[in-house]
Amino acid sequence: MSDLMAFLRLALKSLRNRKFTTFLAVLSIALSTALLLSVERTRRATEEGFTQSISQTDLIVGARSGPINLILYTIFNMGSATNNISWESYQDWKKNSSVEWTIPYSLGDGHRGFRVVATDENFYEHYRFRGDQGVELAQGTSALGLWDVVLGSEVASQLHYQLGDRVTIAHGVTRGEGIQQHDDKPFVVSGIMKPTGTALDTSLYISLYGMEAIHMDWKDGAAPTRDKAIAASSIRLEDIKLGPITAFFLRTKSRIETLRLQRAINTYKEEPLLAIIPGATLSDLWRGLGYIEQALKMISWMVISVGLVAMLIAILTSLNERRREMSILRSIGAGPGEIAALLVFESALLAAVGVLIGLGLELSGFFLLKGWLESRFGLYLVGSPVTSMDLIYLLIIFGSGFFIGLIPAIKASRLALKDGLTAKV
Amino acid sequence: MESDKIIELSQVCFQYPGAKSPTLKISQLDIFKKEKVFLYGPSGSGKSTLLEVLSGILQPQQGEVKILGENLVKMTSHQRDRFRANHLGYIFQSFNLIPYLSVEENITLPLVLSPSRRSKLTSADVSAEVERLCQHLGLGDLKSRGVTQLSVGQQQRVAVARALLGNPELILADEPTSSLDHDHRERFIRLLFEECEARGTTVLFVSHDRSLEKIFTRSLSFNEINQGGAE
Ligand SMILES: Nc1ncnc2c1ncn2[C@@H]1O[C@H](COP(=O)(O)OP(=O)(O)O)[C@@H](O)[C@H]1O
Ligand SMILES: [Mg+2]
């Protein structure tokens, strides 16, 4: 046992003697480990962010179309609905005894390229993403009044809006400026949301009544002529009768009801509707984007290979400088096996230290940059900072480092005495 | 039966892999206990190769290599390594020392690798022995010095101390004086002999330079005992 210790001490002293090569080998392992882990974390956060764009909603319901289309226009602000849901059908399902709450969504208008969502107080109360994250206001109050509008954080920061600013809504969601403006009925910014890192940040939120109010005097999708226009001041919330909505989110009282309710909605007689389970559809969609994940993984492995090769080069280079050392050890009784063990121990140690430093680097980098990554890229991490997958990667790197150490070890164990001693180093 | 021979070679033939002819072809070589043998021969004739065969690092293709009555050829490579650690001391021409270890650590290095060599000494013995060797070899106050700060002469004396620690029966010296100037050579060898005589250690010393021949108890010409050659 003490022999082993003495032996290991010898290896450590030898490493210390070659500080620079040792440093390079450890650095190459550490950097590639850190890179692999951060690519892995990015991948995880991307997937997490994607599939957790909405949570606690059991069903999303819209007019019958494709599930992907439905999820795209409700969650990701992409595409549009082909049809509406009548107010009566909505009420029908809202009052269903298995339903705990619903959030109505009425889409179709925009503001300078951002979407306007008309919804009600349930949105502020019940909408959840990334587990239990809800909609929170950084300033002001929810848009419950007729002319109130709440801004997503991205909208507020890009357009430099503040509480009390007037916002005109364009008819029909468009990129850039709308052609037809509801400029006779401006909204007033009542609140600004905290950043969520989801597509929620890039929308404006008004009440269903507001949405109804700006379209009251419209006929068949066309703006009213001047004489037919109804003045904003003459409209009162109490007088408004709500019309069709685009979609709604639904929470069941008990999760077991979900499938039954989904089937019931999908076979609803009054109107063709489509109900989807958001988690399942999001996972499908993510799997469809699987090549992104593959590409990220490929990059990681290439990075690791480079790191390992760099370590191999560092050890092999130092081996040349160490022929004498090996010869001396041989002359005093070290066998080829012991020489090999010395080198394997060395590369294993380098790999282990490299892997640990890499992990430390990545974790500290991550915690330092966490806030910035969240606000700048919407990359949120849910779950533990180190996953079992990470540990497997670390073991693989360490194992490869160990096996790569066998190459110089075998080479060194074959050196004869003279090789190191006649050399004019 | 206790033999008085420490080295017995018979019909040894050694050829490097890939070489056209054997480097060593020695029909008989006997060296007796407590002898101090000087073996001379030109550079490249195979002297170092012979020492590597004697220490069990190289395996001859034919013949017997008996050291202390034991045939190295019959041993496993692990046994040969153990045998070398336990019974032999090796001194090279130069570069004898591990640069990142201190004088004392270099001297005690064989004990790290050879439990049985150490078991001859208790740890108190080790420090007493190291102390005594260093005093005698003029390394008294250099023990904790890094070896790179020593002169070449001092380095060679450290190598002697290392070869002697733990009382190996046989010292193999491969031109250990060729990096020293003439005055130091003789002083160095006399120091080595004093230590070996005190312990009854046998010395086999190879060199291409015959100027030191007369101090030894016996002198051999490598070309006379060896019929092989690299030509
Ligand atoms: N590893 C080796 N492989 C092949 N040939 C070698 C090897 N080492 C030495 N030789 C050859 O063996 C011969 C003897 O070398 P060596 O024993 O070093 O001679 P000396 O020590 O007498 O100068 C030389 O011709 C040398 O080229
Ligand atoms: Mg030689």
Image (cartoon, rainbow, N blue to C red):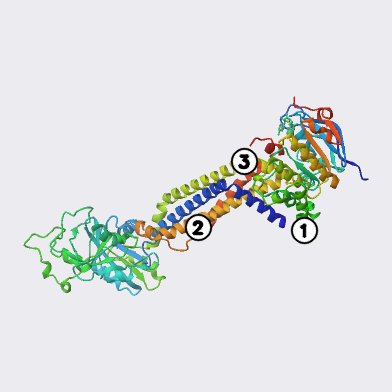
| Mark 3 element type | helix
Q: Is mark 2 within 8 Å of ligand 1?
A: no
Say whether residue A255 is left or right of residue A148: right
Residue A63 showing in the rendered view: no
Say whether residue A359 is left or right of residue A227: right
Residue A179 showing in the rendered view: yes
Kindly identify the amino acid type of the residue bearing the numbered disc 2.
Gly
Kindly identify the amino acid type of the residue bearing the numbered disc 3.
Glu
Q: Which residue is mark 1?
A: B124
Q: Nearer the viewer, residue A306 or A70?
A: A306
Q: Could you tell me which quadrant the N terminus of chain B lies in? A: top right
Q: CA distance from mark 3 to mark 1?
A: 35 Å
Q: Chain of mark 1?
A: B
Kindly identify the amino acid type of the residue bearing the numbered disc 1.
Ala
| Mark 2 element type | helix
Q: Nearer the viewer, residue B162 or A129?
A: B162
Q: Chain of mark 2?
A: A
Residue at screen point 34% across, 72% down: A99
- Circles 2 and 1 in contact, beta carbons < 8 Å: no
Q: Chain of mark 3?
A: A
Total tally of numbered discs in the picture: 3
At which x and y percent is residue B111?
A: 75, 51
Q: Nearer the viewer, residue B76 or A301?
A: B76
Tag on residue A376? none
Crowding around mark 2 (Cα neighbors within 10 Å: few <14, some 14 to 19, many 20+) is: some
Q: CA distance from mark 2 to mark 1?
A: 44 Å
Residue at screen point 76% across, 42% down: B90
- Within the image, what quadrant is residue A168 found in? bottom left
At which x and y percent is residue A35?
A: 47, 51
Q: Which residue is mark 2?
A: A360
